[in-house]
Image (cartoon, rainbow, N blue to C red):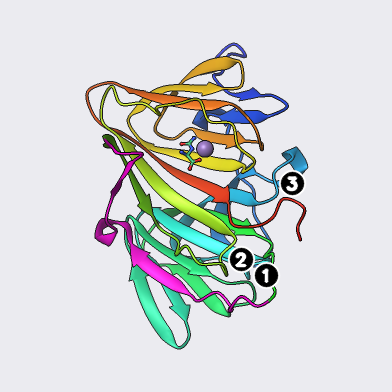
Amino acid sequence: MHRLGATRSRLKADHLLQTPDTFIRSPLPGASGVEFVIHAAPQMGARFTEMTAEFVAGGSLGPAPAQRFVYVLEGELALTVGGREHVLGKGGFAYLGQGAAHTVRAVSAARAAVIEKPYEALPGAPAPEIVVGDEAAVTAAPLMGDEAVRVRALMPDGPEYDFAVNTMTFDPGAALSMVEIHVMEHGLLMLEGGGIYRLSEAWYPVQAGDFIWMRAYCPQWFGALGKRPAKYLIYKDWRRHPLGA
Ligand code: UGY
Ligand code: MN
């Protein structure tokens, strides 16, 4: 069935809304048994890459060209790093610093969000450590005191880390308390539920499965609609001077 050329996807100068009907899968060097939907990349103005990796059982990622963050959406992945194997189920995540030797192999058919970013080293800061965790074990913090919007920080917040990845959960009817305009860019994957996303001068209906990229300074606001919470995974660059100094 075709859609007569219609889609909710939109590409603008300062944002992308990419809905699953427009996803195109591609292979990447070094990976086997994995197809990638490359959502954000330098080719469209992003300073990082974010992709959904779709694994067959036994599929594996290739080497990372930069820092790598993996968040399991479905199925199980075995991460081998530092001589140990960690099995990550849904909500399991890992951060591998640039150059950290590791392998990621699917135990079963699986899907994962993979974020990669060239590391901006900070003189005097220690080297980033490898992080392996489970979102279910991360304490949620209310956003600016609003218990209806809960943030779980998946990355440690030290000077050695140059990006953050959080999940944000909105009760039905909950919303960001302000339109944000900030220097950080975002990659955002809708995980559950839906609502309305304001990006720049447009208001979009969004739902689980959609991806959004926001360039630095893209005006942004979200309100959750429906009868169940809305939840998204959100990346931002963090803790670095805009001049790179
Ligand atoms: O962390 C953030 O900037 C986040 N509050 N932005 C967003 O949800 N669009
Ligand atoms: Mn923001």
Task: Please report the residue visible at 66 percent of the width from the left and 38 percent of the height from the top.
Answer: 216
* Quadrant of residue 195 within the rendered picture: top left
Residue of label 1: 122
The earlier-in-sequence mark between 1 and 3 is: 3
Q: Is residue 204 left or right of residue 183?
A: left
Q: Secondary structure at mark 3?
A: helix
| Amino acid under disc 1 | Leu
Residue under numbered circle 2 = 67
Marks 3 & 2, CB-CB < 8 Å contact: no
The amino acid type found where label 2 is placed reads: Gln
Q: Quadrant of the C terminus?
A: bottom right
Q: How far is mark 1 from mark 3, CA to CA? A: 22 Å
Q: Is residue 212 visible?
A: yes
Q: Are marks 1 and 2 in contact (CB under 8 Å)?
A: no
Tag on residue 42? 3
Please rate how many residues cluster around mark 1, counting C-alpha atoms within 10 Å: few if below 14, some from 14 to 19, many from 20: some
Instruction: Decide: is 141 above or below 227.
Output: below
Query: Label 2 neighbourhood size at 10 Å, few (<14), some (14-19), many (20+)?
Result: many
Q: Residue at x 64, y 76 (%)?
A: 99
Direction left: furthest residue = 227
Q: Residue at x 44, y 65 (%)?
A: 156
The reply, left or right, for residue 130 in relation to residue 219 is: left
Q: Is residue 40 above or below residue 139?
A: above
Residue span colored magenta: 124-146
